[in-house]
Image (cartoon, rainbow, N blue to C red):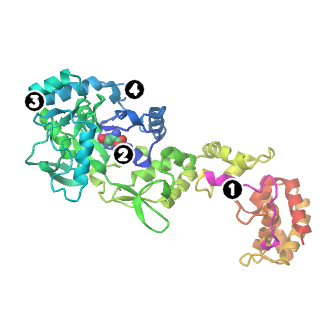
Amino acid sequence: MSEVKTRFAPSPTGFMHIGNLRTALYAYLTAKSQGGKFILRIEDTDQDRKVDGAVQVIYDTLSIAGLRNDEGPDCGGPNGPYVQSERLDIYRKYAQQLVEQGDAYYCFCTKDRLAKLHEEQESPDFKGRHGYDGHCRHLPKAEVEALLAAGTPYVIRQKVPQDGVTAYHDVVFGDVSVSNSELQDIVLIKADGFPTYNFAHVIDDHLMEVTHVTRGSEYVAQTPAYILIYRAFGWEHPTYIHLPLIMGKDAEGNVSKLSKRHGSVSFQDMIEDGYLTEAIINYIALLGWNPKTDEEMFTLAELEKRFNPEAINKSPAIFDYEKLLWFNGQYIRKLSADEFYEKALPFIRQAVKNESIDMRKLAALLQQRLEKMTQIPAQLTFFDALPEYSNELYVNAKSKSTLESAPQALAKSIEVLEGLDEWTNEKLYYALKDVAAELGVKANAVMWAVRVAATGTLVTPGGATDILDILGKEESLNRLKNGLARF
Ligand code: GLU
């Protein structure tokens, strides 16, 4: 078999939907798992949807995600150009060939005529076949030539055989077949001279020697029409790998196509939301594929070895943000202290302006429990200044902290900590344990009171001594004294 070649063929819309990124990933993995090549092609034939900078978003996303393409507009290759708007002559030539062969035809129907046709077909009394009625399918050659010579606007349509069945085998969806009578004479070349997706991708996939087409399942039913185009040219069609839909679940448990109301849906938004690229890639790799074992943690390099398109599941995949968060926490913990510090610092700085705080210590604390970077600022609001808080915070049954025990714990802690010569987490820990022993209370009761006095906050990124250590001796003692004075 010839070398496996897959492609990712996004339309430059300005953002990368997570479903598109999964398509890119699966196409990449399909190639890499078989030692093949991965092509990037920009499908920009819809001129109305052009967005400045959109192609750059595609390059950046693939590069951040580590999906390196072997051919494409950025790196060239033997079958370029890789941008459809630079290939218009190619499409035109092949469309004309189809017209000459009798597999396509010029259609001069005006917008008005098509609108009227559509209106008639919408009527409840309409009994015929929906869609284009084939009005120009059998125009005499001379008439076509006269209309062309007169400069009449036209499109080129596929001439679909009116009988027979077109079938193919999809790697994920199995055997698919459609009666040709159900297919439309779709437009191949539009009035503006640009090809449609329907036509351009067939020509490109053939000329770029694509062996496996990996794309969303919205194209399953339309694929027989594409196969008819391949056949008209006498070309072999590629293997099709249509991917299951990605759904989202709302708060009420209703499932629908993943959209903004479920959460972030673009790669950029997810990154801004604090998710790590590795976690996103690992998670979306499992959205429709699994290794048939219990393993879930995969780096891209591992996926390149393990992925098998035959194991893609056709049932819709549900995007589970909780699970992504779990993956993210796992990947945060895998970062080295330096890597984490670098990523976390901008978020820490959002909440902590005090220069004397040891940011590295703070980062080390955060790395143990964090699920995503954007959770950082809200956890650190007490560092720069003690917030307003209620004495009710001192009451905690589990730690056996009460409004009576707390001031005692604080008073004794202040006394002991003032005499502490070395202000380290470890020394602080043993000092507070001694305080508890002297008072005859549980260590937790002392830790609780001290932590509340030091932070004025119930949920904190570390325990009492972690926080005292970072706040430093002077600030810590001020806060504990302030706590004591409240009673
Ligand atoms: N340009 C199409 C899209 O963005 C690509 C479909 C395909 O991969 O063939 O939906």
Q: Is residue 440 above or below residue 269?
A: below
Work out whether residue 475 or residue 269 is closer to the camera in this orientation and state it: 269
Amino acid at dot 2: Thr
Residue 474 placement (x, y as % from top left): 88, 54
Please tell me whether mark 2 sits on a helix, a strand or a loop.
Answer: helix
3 and 1 marks in contact (CB < 8 Å): no
Q: Residue at x 21, y 36 (%)?
A: 109
Q: According to the image, label 4 marks what residue?
A: 75
Asked if the stretch drawn in magenta spans residue 378, the answer is yes
The CA distance from mark 3 to mark 1 is 68 Å
Q: According to the image, label 2 marks what residue?
A: 23
For the residues carrying marks 3 and 4, which lies nearer the camera in this image?
3
Q: According to the image, label 3 marks what residue?
A: 101
Q: According to the image, label 1 marks what residue?
A: 378
Q: Does the residue labelled 2 lie within 8 Å of ligand 1?
A: yes
Q: Residue at x 83, y 77 (%)?
A: 403
First reached walking from the N terminus: tag 3 or tag 4: 4
Residue 311 placement (x, y as % from top left): 29, 54
| 78 left or right, relative to 410 | left
Mark 2 surroundings within 10 Å by alpha-carbon count, few (fewer than 14), some (14 through 19), many (20 or more): many
